[in-house]
Image (tube, coloured by chain):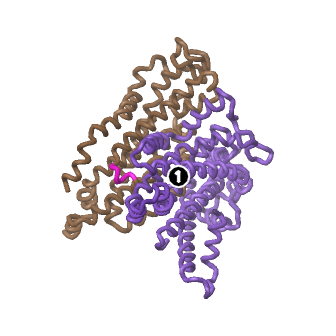
Chain colours: A purple, B brown
């Protein structure tokens, strides 16, 4: 995903050669505009988060102080951490360092990039696997249901997805944990970390991924089903039916392409839920991800770490939304 | 037009009632639960993680407290909080949404707000506000309200747009009525169905967010009984007394599913796709 986005960005900024087709050029410029918009939203979000942490009572110097530390010591640490400078100055410093991959220094004096470098890929692995599983399940269920509208499969999918989408991830996790691990011992209940900081075995990923996938798959299966139902009434789909094509072919070749924008948008909104749910599920399975870092950072009032986590997750969500924008632009052929 | 609008709403009224019943029943049970608790909810009555027995029908929790009594105590604050959040979000969104369709400046602000909110996973925003702002349940409820409003306003605004463009609103605007009169007296009364459906969806979302906060130990503090918190507290003893974990999980799951069933029934089919984001 990163590759496509940067390619598009480069294409948008690179001078367009005279021989390049005009359409590609306008599409690239359009993609550039979308990218710039998404980047701007991300910057605004970070500013809001920075301001929110500032407005809340207490600061990092008092939150991380040791027992018996005097007021003078705390003031010295405040100076050391740069907390005596105005908020906007710290925010600007932090923002200008961001493009170089520098996320600043935590309240305990560690590099934020270093703090997040091991847990973030783990959370991405968890969320990414769950995203792929969600999309595959939702597409399979939604298409099967749409094949015979009102049929038994359609009704069963409708009911089960309605139940699944309402369940919080930790309830699903407990529902999996007891039968799959504690009573049978099939899967490990706790994630052990290998020396490189990643989960030691793929079996440890199964339950967290399932716990994340079930609610989101239910949600997206409904969106797929709804989008296909909308397409079923379109003239070209009716025409394909009247031409005597098999329902399967009509669904996959004629209805599904038009349904992609709605499906992509639905999946993109799931990204935030998946990343948020990952933080929760990680605590139950002791998974070495962002959840633990975040819990510590929030109680320490560690603005750079929190902003770093928000920046990372926000960037991932922005990228997925960007992909959804591009899919929509491609399918509808209109301006992005 | 009126007969076309009435016919589909009259017929399934019984179905709507049937769909709302489980959620309402569970809510009633949770709110009156403390009255039926056989044991005090904060005193040990049996051994820690004791299996079900005559002393405690669902066994003991991590301190030997009666799981059944804590179950009966643990739902009211969760449901009450979710109800309060749903009411607050719906009310704020209904008013803001009506202003948004009448004033382009507010409309743009609402759009940007929703674009912004989608970048922040609700759990992250919740952690940020609730942990740094000591206040337990109130902080969680405030955070859930703040995080829920942006989406909800967008839903109201999209439903209010056709109303705002209709002739009688334009006539009232041309007649010099003030903005708040247009929004609250002319547009809002036509959005009852949308607001009701939105309330259902916000209740579902609030149950999700507040139980999540409870599970993350952000809201209720330890001696308090709370279904989501019980799951977290008793997870280490799930093998000794599974009921200490299974009962609250079932309760949260049943609550979420029954509330969602009710919300589904309240949402007109045509709007279901539009009321997308949670």
Q: Identify the main secondary structure in magenta.
A: helix
* Location of residue B50 by image quarter: top right
Residues A48 and B256: in front is B256
Q: Residue furthest bottom?
A: A18
Q: Residue furthest top?
A: B54
Q: Is residue A55 rendered to the left or right of residue A196?
A: left
Q: Is residue B209 above or below residue B151?
A: above
Q: Which residue is mark 1?
A: A139
Give the image location of residue B183, x and y in percent. 28, 59
Asked if B144 appears above or below B231 in the picture, the reply is: below
Judge whether residue A309 is colored magenta. no
Question: In the image, B61: left or right of B139?
Answer: right
Q: Quadrant of residue A3?
A: bottom right
Residue A224, visible in the rendered structure: yes
* Quadrant (top left/top right/bottom left/bottom right) for the N terminus of chain B: bottom left
B269 drawn magenta: yes
Residue A212 placement (x, y as % from top left): 58, 44
Image check: B5 left or right of A182? left
Q: Report the front residue among A327 and B154.
A: A327
The chain holding disc 1 is: A
| Residue at 36% from the left image edge and 46% from the top image edge | B199
**Magenta stretch in the rendered image:** B268-272
Depth order, front residue of A129/A195: A129
Q: Bin the neighbour count of mark 1 within 10 Å (Cα to Cα): few under 14, some 14-19, many 20 and up.
A: many
Q: Is residue B242 left or right of residue B74?
A: right
Provide the secondary structure element on which disc 1 rests: helix
Regarding residue B125, the answer to whether it shows in the image is no
Q: Residue at x 55, y 83 (%)?
A: A22
Residue A234 pos. (x, y %): 39, 62
């Amino acid at each position: 995903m990163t590759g496509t986005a940067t390619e598009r960005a480069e294409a948008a900024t690179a001078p367009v050669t005279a021989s390049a087709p005009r359409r590609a050029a306008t599409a690239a410029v359009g993609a550039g505009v979308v990218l710039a918009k998404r980047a701007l939203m991300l910057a605004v979000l970070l500013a809001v988060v920075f301001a929110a942490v500032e407005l809340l009572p207490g600061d990092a110097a008092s939150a991380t102080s040791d027992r018996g530390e005097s007021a003078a010591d705390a003031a010295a640490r405040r100076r050391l951490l740069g907390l005596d400078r105005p908020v906007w100055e710290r925010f600007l410093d932090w923002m200008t360092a961001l493009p170089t991959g520098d996320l600043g220094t935590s309240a305990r004096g560690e590099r934020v990039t270093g703090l997040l470098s091991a847990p973030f890929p783990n959370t991405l692995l968890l969320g990414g696997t769950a995203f792929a599983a969600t999309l595959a399940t939702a597409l399979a269920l939604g298409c099967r249901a749409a094949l015979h509208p009102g049929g038994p499969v359609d009704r069963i999918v409708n009911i089960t997805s309605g139940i699944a989408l309402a369940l919080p991830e930790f309830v699903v996790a407990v529902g999996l944990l007891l039968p799959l691990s504690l009573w049978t011992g099939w899967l490990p209940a706790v994630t052990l970390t290998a020396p490189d900081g990643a989960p030691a075995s793929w079996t440890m990923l199964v339950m967290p991924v399932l716990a994340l996938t079930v609610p989101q798959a239910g949600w997206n299966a409904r969106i797929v089903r709804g989008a296909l139902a909308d397409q079923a009434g379109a003239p070209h789909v009716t025409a394909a039916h009247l031409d005597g094509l098999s329902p399967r072919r009509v669904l996959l070749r004629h209805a599904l392409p038009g349904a992609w924008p709605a499906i992509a948008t639905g999946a993109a909104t799931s990204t935030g839920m998946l990343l948020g749910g990952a933080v929760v599920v990680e605590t139950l399975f002791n998974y070495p991800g962002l959840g633990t870092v975040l819990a510590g950072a929030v109680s320490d009032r560690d603005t750079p770490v929190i902003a770093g986590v928000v920046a990372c997750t926000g960037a991932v969500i922005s990228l997925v939304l960007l992909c959804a924008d591009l899919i929509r632009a491609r399918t509808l052929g209109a301006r992005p | 037009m009126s007969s076309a609008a009435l016919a589909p709403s009259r017929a399934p009224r019984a179905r709507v009632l049937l769909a709302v019943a489980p959620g309402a029943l569970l809510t009633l049970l949770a709110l009156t639960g403390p009255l039926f608790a056989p044991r005090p909810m904060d005193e040990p009555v049996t051994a820690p993680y004791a299996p079900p027995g005559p002393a405690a029908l669902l066994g003991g929790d991590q301190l030997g407290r009666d799981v059944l009594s804590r179950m009966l105590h643990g739902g009211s604050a969760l449901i009450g909080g979710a109800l309060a959040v749903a009411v607050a979000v719906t009310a704020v969104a209904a008013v803001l949404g009506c202003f948004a369709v009448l004033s382009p400046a507010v409309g743009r602000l609402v759009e940007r707000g929703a674009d912004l909110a989608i970048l922040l996973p609700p759990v992250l925003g919740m952690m940020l506000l609730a942990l740094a702002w000591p206040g337990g349940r109130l902080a969680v409820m405030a955070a859930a309200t703040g995080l829920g409003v942006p989406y909800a306003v967008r839903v109201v605004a999209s439903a209010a747009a056709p109303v705002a463009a209709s002739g009688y609103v334009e006539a009232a605007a041309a007649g010099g009525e003030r903005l708040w009169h247009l929004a609250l007296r002319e547009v809002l009364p036509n959005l009852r169905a949308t607001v009701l459906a939105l309330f259902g969806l916000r209740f579902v979302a609030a149950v999700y967010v507040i139980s999540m906060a409870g599970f993350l130990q952000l809201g209720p503090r330890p001696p308090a009984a709370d279904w989501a918190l019980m799951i977290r507290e008793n997870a280490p003893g799930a093998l000794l007394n599974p009921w200490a974990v299974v009962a609250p999980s079932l309760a949260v799951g049943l609550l979420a599913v029954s509330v969602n069933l009710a919300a589904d029934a309240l949402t007109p089919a045509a709007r279901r796709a539009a009321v997308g984001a949670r």
